[in-house]
Amino acid sequence: MEGSLMDALVGKQYELLTFENEVVKVESAGTVIQIGIKNELGKEFSWLEPQHPFRPLPLNLPKQDKWDVSFEVPNEDEMRAIFTCGEESHVLTLRCSDPTVHPKPIEVSWQ
């Protein structure tokens, strides 16, 4: 379900601008943050749905289309998803800049 619809149904828990590129789409979706991994056609086909406080995700995540994805959670306010395909590598970082406010502000970066 689209993130904006989830926000409308269950209340907006996260303040973040939708981030989208050729590999991922990241958006607020009620109680979760949706990370949609895209296939070669540019369509989201696999969804991850972390929540704050961030916790480690499954270690044995299968290959996502052509991408190997691994996660680092250095603390409950930051999570990194590392995407690798051959020599190409990207890091998606989600960071909660102030967990005391509501909705929680989430910064998204892609390197």
Image (cartoon, helix red, strand yellow):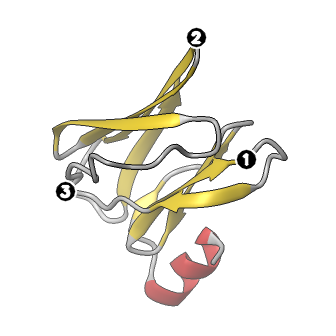
Q: Where is residue 70 in the image (x, y as percent from the top left)?
A: 37, 36
Three-letter code for the amino acid on which mark 3 is drawn: Thr
Residue ranking furthest to the left: 75
| Residue 18 appearing in the image | no
Q: In this view, does 108 lie to the left or right of 38?
A: left
If you read the primary sequence from the N terminus, does the residue marked by circle 3 or circle 1 appear first?
Answer: 1
Q: In this view, does 82 lie to the left or right of 88?
A: left
Q: Name the residue under label 2.
A: 87
Q: Are marks 1 and 2 in contact (CB under 8 Å)?
A: no
Three-letter code for the amino acid on which mark 1 is drawn: Asn
- Give the quarter of the image for residue 49: bottom left
Quadrant of the rendering where the N terminus is positioned: bottom right
In depth, the one of 78 and 105 nearer the eye is 78
The kind of secondary structure element at disc 1 is loop
Residue ranking furthest to the bottom: 9
If you read the primary sequence from the N terminus, does the residue marked by circle 3 or circle 2 appear first?
Answer: 2
Three-letter code for the amino acid on which mark 2 is drawn: Glu
Q: Which of marks 3 and 1 is in front?
A: 1
Q: Name the residue under label 1.
A: 39
* Mark 3 to mark 2 CA distance (whole Å): 39 Å
Residue ranking furthest to the right: 41
Q: Where is residue 91 in the image (x, y as percent from the top left)?
A: 46, 26
| Residue 81 appearing in the image | yes
* Mark 1 to mark 2 CA distance (whole Å): 18 Å
Any mark on residue 12, and which?
none
**Residue at position x 39%, y 49% from top?**
61
Q: Name the residue under label 3.
A: 100
| 88 relative to 8, above or below | above
- Give the quarter of the image for residue 75: top left
Label 3: few (<14), some (14–19) or many (≥20) C-alpha neighbours in 10 Å: few
Q: Nearer the viewer, mark 3 or mark 2?
A: 2
